Image (cartoon, rainbow, N blue to C red):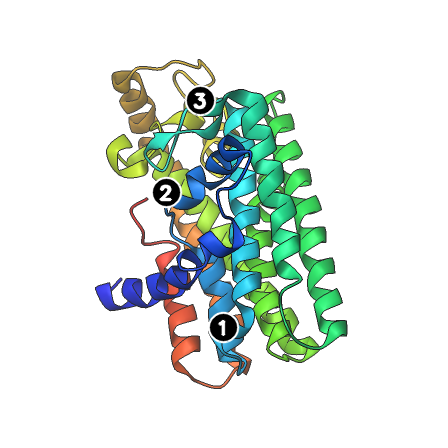
Amino acid sequence: MSDDVIRRIKEKGTLVDDVLDMYLPIVSPVELYKASRHLVDAGGKRLRPATLILAAEMCGAKAEDVLPAAVAVEFVHNFTLIHDDIMDKDDLRRGLAAVHVIWEEPGAILAGDTLYSKAFEILADCKGDPKRLVDVFRILSKTCTEICEGQWMDIDFESRTEVSESEYITMVEKKTSVLYGASAMIGGILAGASEEEAQALWNFGTYTGIGFQIFDDVLDLITPEAVLGKVRGSDIMEGKRTIIAIHAKEHGVDIPYFGCGDATTAQIEEALQVLDKAGSIEYANKKAVEYVENGKVQLDMFNDSDAKKTLLELADYMISRTH
C-alpha cells in the first residue's frame, strides 16, 4: 500500500475531523461530551466515512454534500467501540485508556448513547431529495439494529463449545461489515445512485468489511501491543470464536490458554505457534483476501474515476494494514 493511497484516504477522514467541534462541541455537562469525544479525538482510520465520501464522489456528488452522513457513520462506529470495550472488559483502545476506564461504566454507556443519538441528529443536516433521505435514515437505523444482533451473537459464541464458520461469518457481517455496507450505500444514494448501483455499493462494503474483520482477527494475534493499540492476543484470552479458532478446532487442535483471561506474553506466543503450525492463521488470511476480492468486483459497473480507484485501493488496505 503506497503512502499516496493512505494520504488520499486520510484526506477524506480529515474532512470529518474539521467539523467535529461543530457537530459535537464540548458543552455542559462537560464530562459527558469529553467522554463522547475521547475515542473520536483519538483519531482512528476514518475508513467508514472515507468509504461513504468516496462512494458519493464516484457517483457524481461532492464531499461537502455528504459530510454530515460521513460524520454520522463515524459516530455510530465509535458508539459501538465504547460499548464493546465495556462488554469485552478491554481497557485499551487506540493506545489510550478505554472510555469506561476513565469515566466508569455508567459514564461510558451515556457517552456511547450520546454518539448514537447525535449520529441521527447530524444525518438530518444532509441536503437532497427527501425520499432518498428517508431511505438513508432507514438504512442506518437498520444497520444499528444489525450491529446489536451481531454483538449478541459474538457474546453468545463465548458460552458455546461449537460454532460453525458460517455462523461466524453471519456474526461478522452483522457486527462489523454492515456499517461498511451502509457507508458505501448511503454515499451512493445521497449522490443519486440507481437501485442497482446502491446494491452494488452495499455488496462492496459488506464483502470488504468481512475481509476487514477476518484480517483484524489475524492482527489481534500477530501485531505488537504498541502498534495494535490494545492488548495483544485478547481474542485468545477471552475465548473468542474467531475463524482462526474455529479452523483450529475443526482440525482437532487445542489452543493453549484459550479463554484463560490473563495469559502472559510467553503463553500467547505459545498459542500463536500452535495456531501457525495448524495453518489456521494462513487460512484466515486467505479468506480475508477472498472476501475483499469479491467486494472489489462489485465496482465493475461504475465508470473509472479517481474515487473508484481510491475505493479499490482502500479495499486492498483492509487486508494490508498493520493495525
Give the mark nearest the N terminus, 2 or 1.
Answer: 2
> Gap between marks 2 and 1, in whole Å?
23 Å
**Secondary structure found at label 3:** helix
Q: Please, which residue is most extreme toward the front here? A: 28
Q: Residue at x 34, y 65 (%)?
A: 11
Residue labelled with disc 2:
42
Residue labelled with disc 3:
101
Q: Is residue 283 left or right of residue 141?
A: left
- How crowded pointer 2 is (Cα within 10 Å; few <14, some 14-19, many 20+) is rated as few
> Gap between marks 1 and 3, in whole Å?
36 Å
Q: Is residue 149 left or right of residue 253?
A: right
> Could one spot residue 302 in this view of the protein?
yes
Give the mark nearest the N terminus, 2 or 3.
Answer: 2
**Viewer-closest of 283 and 53:** 53
Residue 316 place in picture, x, y as percent: 37, 62
Residue labelled with disc 1:
64
